[in-house]
Image (cartoon, helix red, strand yellow):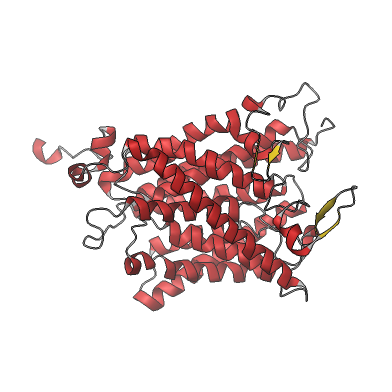
Amino acid sequence: MTGEFDTGDTAWMLMAASLVLLMTPALALFYGGMSRQKSVLNMMMMSFGSMGLVGIIYLLWGWSMSYGGQSVGGVFANPFEMFGLSGVIGDASGWVASGSGAYPQVVDVAFQVTFAIITVALISGSLAERVKFGTWMAFAGIWVTLAYFPLAHMVWGGGLLSHSENGIAAKIFGTVDDGEGGLTAAVAPIDFAGGTVVHINAGIAALVLVLLIGKRLEFGRTAYRPHNLPLVMLGAALLWFGWFGFNAGSAFGANGAAGLAWVNTTAATAAAMLGWLVAERIRDGHATSLGAASGVVAGLVAITPAAGSVSPLGAVALGAVAGILSALAVGLKYRFGYDDSLDVVGVHLVAGLWGTVAIGLFATGTFDTAAGLFYSADGWKLLVIQAVIAVVALGFTAVMTTIAWALCKPLGWRIDAADEQSGIDGTQHAETAYEPSTTALIR
């Protein structure tokens, strides 16, 4: 589809893509600081490895599987239709991103690849100190193909979890005329920037992996404390900065929807940080820097699916609840005995689920979305749809993650017990983050 481009939209989308790409190195800092000193490099390398691997896979078949026109049962698109971005890059007149803004389609590819990269990297936080780097890389390539690309197609590419007339939402509450000679779901599901595709997806994958791979050797007996809290806070700050590209960029143009997403992202994140700190103060007697950083991430996660459909006051309420829920949820791993090392489940799965379902309560009906229960007598329908897409995403990704884990099992998932004791950085990468000081010897 060719046409005239809006240079403002094009510039904004390229900027948004760059901001989202920054989020993965920011995540590496966040996770690296939360790790112990002898595993910080491995933790950061898992994020950087995801950037390298997924960055190539997406261009080969990821875009085609996510947004190709030849859908296979509404679950994924033909990976060979646009293999290697065939047909995506046009001549001087370019290719408009159909259904998005007035900018070349290759710009949309640039934006979407960054989402795939960070979704894979998020999972790594659950596996600190015990997984072979080579096996992680193999898993990353298989998982993004089996889980991420299909879910992106189902939610954003016109598949089973979208507003499509053949989607689940249309089957539940019927269809209406879309005004363009076709049909669309009467109550369309909302995932503005990736609550389902990114956070529920990564969060449930993390939970499945920690259950299948098992705990660290000293889990429950040793206090795994962050080795560098300033690094954690720097990572959280950069994540917040990059998230404006994540959410405001998902308006697909320099417009009012982007402005609303920006304001809602700030409001929810600030409220979540305060909510986490209050919960921490009441429970533990202290408000910590780790809690502040974690609260920031919880708020960012929760507002992601709702950024374009709630009011700023709704964003404050949504964020505050997310901060409290996640602050409480991160302790569940000790009660139930699963070793979610850096709280991917407690933050991304819990806040992602809350943000996705809460749309059914707080959506105002702005920008042609359905209204939620607090704004419409029929809002219960949107609440049902949001809950259904969340449950379907949970089940689908749990199955795909189990398959990806099994396919990688012959490679061996766990490092040796002795290597885990001595430190994964030295055994997997032959490096240490901090060389011992020789000052005392010189003196």
Taking the image as shown, residue 418 lies to the left or right of residue 287, namely left
Q: Give 405 or 224, whichever is nearer the viewer.
A: 405
Q: Position of residue 347 (x, y in %)?
A: 47, 60
Q: Quadrant of residue 343?
A: bottom left
Q: Position of residue 189 (x, y in %)?
A: 70, 58
Taking the image as shown, residue 398 lies to the left or right of residue 89, namely left
Assign the C terminus to one quadrant of the image. Answer: top left
Taking the image as shown, residue 61 lies to the left or right of residue 96, namely left
Q: Quadrant of residue 418?
A: top left
Q: Quadrant of residue 408?
A: top left
Against 16, residue 283 (above or below) is: below
Whether residue 299 is visible to the viewer of this picture, yes or no, is: no
Taking the image as shown, residue 331 lies to the left or right of residue 65, namely left
Whether residue 304 is visible to the viewer of this picture, yes or no, is: yes
Name which residue lies at 64% across and 28% down: 80
Name which residue lies at 62% across and 25% down: 84
Name which residue lies at 28% across and 35% down: 428
Q: Give 281 or 424, whichever is nearer the viewer.
A: 424
Q: Give 91 or 120, whichever is nearer the viewer.
A: 120
Against 293, residue 245 (above or below) is: above
